[in-house]
Image (tube, rainbow, N blue to C red):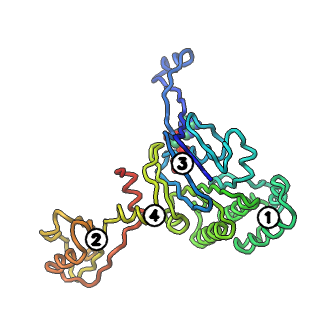
Amino acid sequence: MIEVSGMSKHYRIVKKQPGLSGAVKGLFSREYTVKKAVDDISFQIKPGEMVGYIGANGAGKSTTIKMLCGILTPSSGEVRVGGIVPYKERKRNAKNIGAVFGQRTQLFWDIAVRESYDLLKHIYEIPDKEYRETIAMFTEVLQLEPLLGVPVRQLSLGQKMRCELAAAFLHSPSIVFLDEPTIGLDVAVKVKIREFIKKMNQARGTTVILTTHDMQDIEEICNRIIIIDEGKVLYDGSLQSIKDQFGHKRVIHFELDQEGLFALPERLSNQAEFSQEEDGIVSVSFSNQAITAADVITEVMKDYRIRDLTIADPKIETIVQEIYEKGI
Ligand SMILES: Nc1ncnc2c1ncn2[C@@H]1O[C@H](COP(=O)(O)OP(=O)(O)OP(=O)(O)O)[C@@H](O)[C@H]1O
């Protein structure tokens, strides 16, 4: 379905010389540096997969997605989306794909949402019956009824995002690219959007490529993640296996029955770290490969009276953040 092989995108950036003389010199002779926004990446995505394409700011996510959509031409390497080379056949590719790009809108700003959908119907040549059924289903799942008669510019962020999603899936594309579809939205709308995406995947087998900084989106929607860093693929695999490989860190939150500064028991000093948020509230973190939770609790119990404790599961958020910071 999606085949990417050795794909790169290099930008040539003008090197700015310092000072006024540098600016004048720059008018006559320009020096360039090369920014490898995407650097020799390869992956394949099968029909119906839901893949989280994640990475820190500037890692190369949007550049990759733009090449898959045909908006950008790769500097080298190969890319095929549903058998089509996107930058060579941008229009044909557009029929197969849908997209939501963060803050940008594909709806028409000044006309009612329903009229925007009518226009998209004509652009994508959606048959009448299919269009009516699709609109009825989307209206129900995304609760669009009160929004259909409203011009886009009058919609709130969450309302607009629900309408955008419907627009992206309207022509039954086989692949949908979603760039930060839940950014800035309240929890209730996030839940609705995630449910809609999963429903589309189940009902139509739509392949979904999701870029997001929200790890909850990833946990709930994606069965595979690709982590990209400085333009290179750092990890490609299941969410579970990244948890298995890197999720050894545990945190135990203690509520102690005594006040005063906490000190880590001697036996834990090389194997654990702690932070004390306030009097009597202490978090001890450790790797469960080095020491067991039972040992940590036993050691703390020797020196302190414990009123309550909770053991926190390793959050995918923490794991991914560590991978961004330290690499694999
Ligand atoms: N037109 C351009 N000219 C020069 N450099 C660019 C251009 N577009 C992107 N870059 C650079 O390429 C790198 C990758 O950018 P990209 O937008 O793909 O990152 P991203 O992973 O989508 O980041 P974010 O999470 O912040 O959206 C960044 O260092 C960026 O500054």
Does label 1 or label 4 sit earlier along the sequence? 1
Does label 2 or label 3 sit earlier along the sequence? 3
Residue 150 numbered tag: 1
Mark 3 lies on residue: 61
Is 115 situated left or right of 321 in this image?
right
The location of residue 162, given as percent across then percent down, is 68, 65
Question: Which residue is at a point 30% across and 70% down the rendered structure image?
Answer: 251
Mark 4 lies on residue: 239
Task: Please name the amino acid that badge 1 sits on.
Answer: Val
**Image: 111 above or below 141:** above
Task: Please name the amino acid that badge 4 sits on.
Answer: Leu
Mark 2 lies on residue: 283
Does label 1 or label 3 sit earlier along the sequence? 3
**Image: 230 above or below 308:** above
Task: Please report contact status of discs 1 and 3: CB closer than 8 Å, yes or no.
Answer: no
Looking at the rendered structure, the secondary structure element under dot 4 is helix
Looking at the rendered structure, the secondary structure element under dot 1 is loop
**Image: 275 above or below 328:** below
